[in-house]
Image (cartoon, helix red, strand yellow):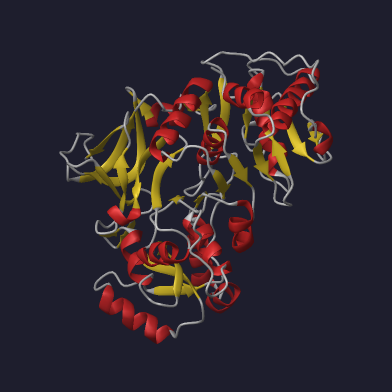
Amino acid sequence: MNVTEPIRRIARLNPSATAIIRADGSSISYGVLDHAIDRMAGYAARLGLEPGDVAGLSIAGPDESLGLTLMLALARIGVASAEPNAPAEGLRLRFQAGAATAPGNVGFDACWMSSEPAPADHVPAPIRNDPAALFRIFSSSGTTGRPKHIAVTQAVQLRRVFAFGLADGLGPAVRVIGINLGCSWGCATALRTLWAGGTIVLSNPAHAPDTIPRHGVTSIVTSPVSLRMILDALPPGTGPFPRLEQIEVGGSVVPETLWRMAAERLCRRIVSIVGSGEAGLTASAPIDALIARRGAGGLIVPGVEIEAMDEANHTLPPGHEGVLRIRSDRLASGYLQDPESSTERFRDGWFYSNDIGTVWPDGLLTISGRTSDVINAGGVKVHPQVIESALLKLPLVVDAAAFGVPDATGVTRIWAAIVARSRIDDAVLNAFCRHALPGISPQTILQMKALPRNENGKVRREQLVDIGLHANRRPAEAMAAHV
């Protein structure tokens, strides 16, 4: 099966149903969407793209529906899409929204997308069925350095979408997708929405107070930072919303204070999502069933095996913390043009992640952090989440990150960065940390307007480390730039 077949089926059965609501409020029906996919597929073929080719394509932009439709058009004819930062030698060409500004790029705009359903005499474009063909090359988060490029086949993408649908259990939804549609999670969410005959709502989180009731939104998929933006946009006395059934949050563990605010002002059912571009969805569960277990991400989903490994690569028994490895039929086939990393991380049918966590006897998965994030402060190893959880208990703090910064002698010191509703006195911060974090209190706490994050909401710790290094060299200027 091709990932676009369910869309064509709904277009035949219910062509007037709304498939996408754009940010400007205009809508696209399933009949129009399927015809636009055919039309764009024709344009792509006339450009010389053939099955097996790969084209660069970003879904992000002023009109995400255009990028999403083009991605589906390429998939329909067996052409894979990739984030534009993928290695150039692997790309036949790059698509660019609007006018092309670089040699070799092909511009596309609203003219590519039909605004009408297919005419009665329209002959549907053939759908290429090749389960082994590449569907999309996703980019990793890049939070620990150079992003890797994750090759996912049509067959693997199909299984990932089915897995999300099984965990979801909502059926057709009117869904706000507050994450990049071109990433692994965003793409799977868009497809499961369309496969079920639901509606994708493209909206800025700041517009949530109007968007949710206007379009009868029943589901929101977002990151913790975007969830915070939605809550901050709600006027006093607004919410909860009777039609809103579920919010899915992923990218990092949801702080308890944020969960409680969202449950009170948006809807009761808030679900934690754990996954990756390499493995797809791996665990999920309603947060109210997890909140008593620190770091709990969810219950391992059916069809996925996860084991914790020790430093000698031996499997640890349930209840013991180690580096996690994952096995399922939803794993990517490896990294594009990176055989060394592919061999290191994809071995013997397993994906070896950089996540540190615990698999409990009841199937619960808790995440302690990432191997690359652990702070080795003079021989004392600290998970950043321990410090972040403590800082988020301060009433004014809305975001926090901990990281290690080498001092002038090369010894790593614990630093933290926070975002607060108003400035907190440094003496108050230091006293709180000495009490809440004995022995691991941060040496320095930066108060910032916003933490650097990637498009999926994950903190870019390497940028924070750079800020710390700069602050060590030029303390006054560095601090002033980020307060």
| Residue 289 visible in the picture | yes
Whether 223 is drawn above or below 233: the answer is above
Question: x, y percentage for residue 80?
Answer: 62, 24
Whether 460 is drawn above or below 117: the answer is below
Q: Quadrant of the C terminus?
A: bottom right
Left or right relative to 15: residue 158: left
Camera-side residue of 414 and 202? 202
- Look at 51% across and 26% down and name the residue there: 152
Whether 193 is drawn above or below 51: the answer is below
Residue 212 falls in image quadrant: bottom right
Left or right relative to 11: residue 239: left
- Look at 84% across and 40% down and name the residue there: 99
Whether 66 is drawn above or below 410: the answer is above
Question: x, y percentage for residue 374?
Answer: 34, 54
Camera-side residue of 210 and 471? 210
Question: x, y percentage for residue 63?
Answer: 73, 45
Camera-side residue of 77 and 337? 77
Camera-side residue of 277 and 480? 277
- Look at 39% across and 54% down and name the residue there: 269
- Look at 42% across and 68% down and name the residue there: 416
> Total marks drawn?
0
Left or right relative to 318: residue 301: right
| Residue 84 visible in the picture | no
